[in-house]
Image (cartoon, rainbow, N blue to C red):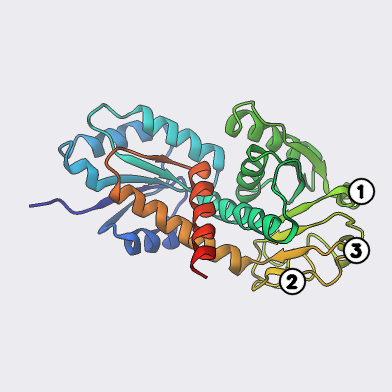
Amino acid sequence: MEKPFILHMLTTAKNLSPFDVNMAVDAGWVSAIPYTNIEASEVQGLVQDVIFSRSAKNLKRTSIFIGGRDTKQAMDMLRIAKHAMIPPFQVSIFADPSGAFTTAAAMVAAVEHELKQKFNTTLEGKNILALAGTGPVGQAAAVIAAKAGANVRIIGRQLDKAQHIADVCNCEFGEGKITILAGADVDKAEYIKTTDVVFATGAAGIELLSAELIASAQQLKVAADVNAVPPAGIAGIDAMSNGTPITDSISGAVGIGALAIGNVKYQTQNLLLKQMINCEKPLYLHFEHAFEVAREYIKSTQKSS
């Protein structure tokens, strides 16, 4: 008899995200088993309990999901889990803390699509502001965009915190191959004058970019906002915006709202969860793989429309 599909779901938080559980079961995982308040030191033991409790053949029906709230912590746990494997006893692992990796991937892929469709250009060389970019989504989006060739600046209320996060992104996620800059919120009016793309990744219900600042953005092309709770993070963009012209833009910029981003995020997470079910060899998935899948999903929807 074939063994059931089991997804072991680890989180450093008090509770596992119900969103992630629903996504896992809907993707085909029969059982989604939660492990909460997990510390990095516990990961190796848990992983080896997973891999040694089934035959190598049945481990194809077993995988691990890493959640939590911290991007660096999730990537550290992914590395620990990967190193804990003893071939041929190996399983796939997917890290997506707070849904940040799939959300960021969806946002950057959607922006990339609008740049191509509306402005016949790419992310390469574009100046990007990641507003409130010190959080998980902002960090992941900044790294993805920087790896695609963009010039990214993370904006935070406190310059020292923004600089620390930029350093972490460059060294930990970018492996020293990218250079993300930092900036303070008080200097936003100056930065916006030479900005091509804006990511708004702040807390719900807080406006990060006003109509006045949009009107001063002479080369702004695309602005994306992950906030679905009024007021919008970017003036003139609502949750349904999907390549919609921004009213106060003097440069003809278009906006992408939270629901448009959320649809791509949902499909991306679903496809990655299914990849682990269908793979022949173990996969180790994070923000880079999410971006690849988000890009392909957007391309597929354009071909079918």
Total marks placed: 3
The tag on residue 215 is 3
Give the secondary structure at mark 2.
loop
Q: As rendered, which of 193 and 93 lies closer to the eye?
A: 193
Pointer 3 with pointer 1, Cβ within 8 A: no
Closer-to-camera residue (252/194) = 252
Q: CA distance from mark 3 to mark 1?
A: 13 Å
Q: What kind of residue is marked 3?
A: Ala
Q: Amino acid at mark 2?
A: Pro
Q: Position of residue 69 (x, y in %)?
A: 53, 48
Q: Read off the residue under disc 1.
A: 190
Q: Which mark is residue 231?
A: 2
Say above or below: 127 vs 89.
Answer: below
Nearest to the observer: residue 188 or residue 107: 107
Q: Taking 119 as reference, is 180 above or below it?
A: above
| Residue in view at x 59 percent, y 27 percent | 175
Query: Upstream in the sequence, badge 2 or badge 1?
Result: 1
Packing grade of label 3 (10 A; few <14, some 14-19, many >=20) is some
The image position of residue 173, as x and y in percent, is 58, 34
Q: Nearer the viewer, mark 3 or mark 1?
A: 3
Which mark is in front, 2 or 1? Answer: 1
**Residue 206 visible in the picture:** no
- In the image, taking residue 138 as reference, residue 22 lies left or right, namely left
> Which numbered disc, 2 or 3, marks the residue that appears first in the sequence?
3
Q: Nearer the viewer, mark 2 or mark 3?
A: 3
Please say if 188 is above or below 230.
above
Assess disc 1: are there few (<14), some (14-19) or many (≥20) residues with their C-alpha within 10 Å of its C-alpha: few
User: Which element is circle 1 on?
Assistant: helix
Q: Secondary structure at mark 3?
A: helix
